[in-house]
Image (spheres, rainbow, N blue to C red):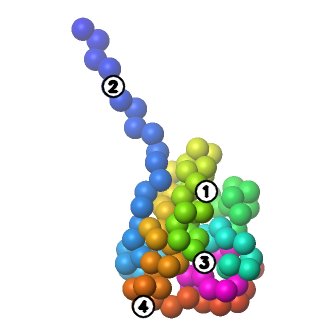
Amino acid sequence: MQMMTARLLPCVKILTPLQLKLYQSQFIVVDVRSWLGYLMGHIPGALRMNRDRVLQEISKHQQIVITCRSGNLSFPVAKWLVKQGYQNVYNLQGGCIAWQKLGYPLEKGNKSL
């Protein structure tokens, strides 16, 4: 009898705002919203990047947290990055809204150069 083995495929991991706050130095935080959304308020230190720029500038082995306003835009981008071979992709649960609800500050303006 031949045993079938399941091959584990990489998947998007979920990170809570508290986990990000505690371990942010271990991640590159990428905000995938429009420039206007990013400028109006983003997680301090987050880079505003579209998915093509992520492919060009971030190693597939780097730990990346993808975020947006609520988590709804970031999750499909995170899934796409996993399909492109990224191994350590996290989606911020609840996005910037959840971050702010816990009393964590948002940064305004353009810090992404």
- 92 w.r.t. 77: above or below: below
Judged from the image, the secondary structure of the residue bearing numbered disc 2 is loop
Q: Which residue corresponds to mark 1? A: 77
**On the image, numbered disc 4 is attached to which residue?**
103
> What amino acid is found at the position of numbered circle 1 in the picture?
Val
Real-space Cα separation, disc 2 to disc 4, in angstroms:
45 Å
Classify mark 3: helix, strand or loop. loop
For label 4, the SS is loop
Separation of marks 3 and 4 at Cα, in angstroms: 17 Å
Amino acid type, callout 4: Gly
Q: Is residue 49 left or right of residue 86?
A: right
Q: Amino acid at mark 3?
A: Ala
Q: CA distance from mark 3 to mark 2?
A: 39 Å
Secondary structure character of the magenta stretch overall: loop
Q: Are marks 1 and 3 in contact (CB under 8 Å)?
A: no
Which circle's residue, 1 or 4, is located before the other in the chain?
Answer: 1
- Which residue is labeled 3 in the image? 46
Count how many numbered circles sit on residues in the image: 4
Q: Which label lies toward us, 3 or 4? A: 4
Of callouts 1 and 2, the N-terminal one: 2
